[in-house]
Image: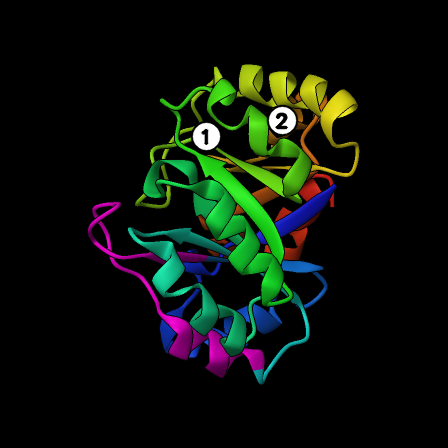
Amino acid sequence: MIIAPSILSADFGRLADSVNLVKEAKWLHVDVMDGHFVPNISIGPVVVKGLRKYTSQIFDTHLMISEPNKYIPQFIEAGSDRITFHIEAVKDPLITIKLIRSLGAKVGISIKPGTPVNSIVKWIPFIDQILVMSVEPGFGGQDFIMNSSLKIMEIDELRKSLNKDLLIVVDGGINKITSKFCKEAGADVLVAGSYIFNSENPMEKMESLGW
């Protein structure tokens, strides 16, 4: 199980120091929000570029933005290793997939809680990961939506025939209890923000998730 701490919940006044608290994590999750696709604003490529100087961890960048194609090159140039875009934000997913691939990054597609898995089935053979949002995207600290486990199970079954290397990522409301539901359903990567960073011992919290 890969645990990807979400820097959305880190201390932005001491971002490098916060990331150092989870330096043993293989991935860092970078939530990018534009105030349009979701009702919140977070960070841009400048922050990613600045943080890249302090760590060699994999930057798993989640674009919760409208018109992601306009900004994907900037985030990859800044140091993002994996780019996940929302199926709800693009007209032609294949164009976005090809763009990310052409720039040397891994490709992910995310779906909101209300978006069915069948909306992304045709793209599974062409991507590296699917991000299941287990809360409504936009804000940290929300409660896990329980039927997200059914989506994870559905994707886990589909990848057996469509893409055995596909990673299932789950983001939202992850804690010691909900992580078990996700793992049992077939998840490979758990994104956790407030659960990890809003504690005195972030590494201990990571370990409790099955790291």
168 up-or-down from 138: above or below: above
Residue beneath disc 1: 134
Please state the horizontal and vertical placement of residue 45, each as a whole percent of the image: 41, 73
Residue at 28% in and 51% down: 66
Occupied quadrant, residue 123: top right
The magenta stretch spans residue 45: yes
- Tell me the kind of residue under disc 2: Cys
Residue to which mark 2 is pinned: 182
Task: Find out whether residue 38 is within the magenta segment.
Answer: yes
Mark 1 or mark 2: whose residue is earlier in sequence = 1
Q: Residues within 10 Å of mark 2 (few under 14, many from 20)?
A: many
Q: Quadrant of the N terminus?
A: top right
Observer able to see residue 201? no
Closer to the camera in the image, 72 or 184: 72
Q: Nearer the viewer, residue 56 or 210?
A: 56
Bounds of the magenta segment: 31-52
Residue 48: x and y in percent read: 47, 74
Residue 75: percent from the left, percent from the top? Answer: 46, 69
Look at 36% across and 70% down and name the residue there.
Answer: 44
Amino acid type assigned to the residue bearing label 1 in the image: Ser
Q: At x 63% / y 43%, what residue is drawn?
A: 127
Q: Which mark is residue 37?
A: none
Circle 2 — which element? helix
Way the structure is coloured? rainbow
Q: Are marks 1 and 2 in contact (CB under 8 Å)?
A: yes
